[in-house]
Image (cartoon, grey):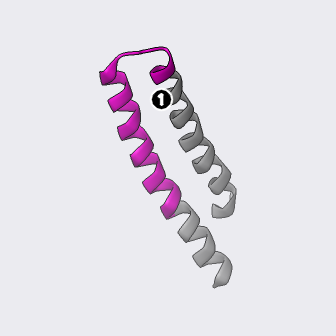
Amino acid sequence: MSISMLVPVAIGAVAIVLLLGLLNMVRDGSPSTSQTLMRWRVGLQFVAIIVIVAAIWFKAG
């Protein structure tokens, strides 16, 4: 499994958590759930950036 195959998985994970957070806001859900989802989103965005940079790095090299 190449690293470039992980890029859509990482982006998809960020999108799912983002949508869950938006749904929680629209439903007037718990603020603590919103904060937890925001923390997960930030962490997953960090991982996605690392995966994308690694894919570009290995493709160029």
Question: How many neighbours does mark 1 have within 10 angstroms: few (below 14), some (14-19), or many (20 or more)?
Answer: many
Does residue 24 appear left or right of residue 19 in this picture? left
Q: Name the residue at 52% across, 36% down.
A: 18
Residue 43: % across, % down: 40, 47
- Residue 45, compared with residue 58, is above or below; it is above
Considering the whole magenta stretch, tell me its main secondary structure: helix
- Which residue, as the protein is rendered here, is positioned at the far bottom? 61
Three-letter code for the amino acid on which mark 1 is drawn: Gly
- Residue 45, compared with residue 15, is above or below; it is below
Residue 7: % across, % down: 63, 56
Secondary structure found at label 1: helix
Q: Name the residue at 58% across, 77% down.
A: 57
- Residue 49, compared with residue 19, is above or below; it is below
Tag 1 residue: 21
| Magenta span includes 48 | yes
Residue 51: % across, % down: 54, 61
Residues shaded magenta: 24-50
Quadrant for the C terminus in the image: bottom right
- Which residue, as the protein is rendered here, is positioned at the far left? 32
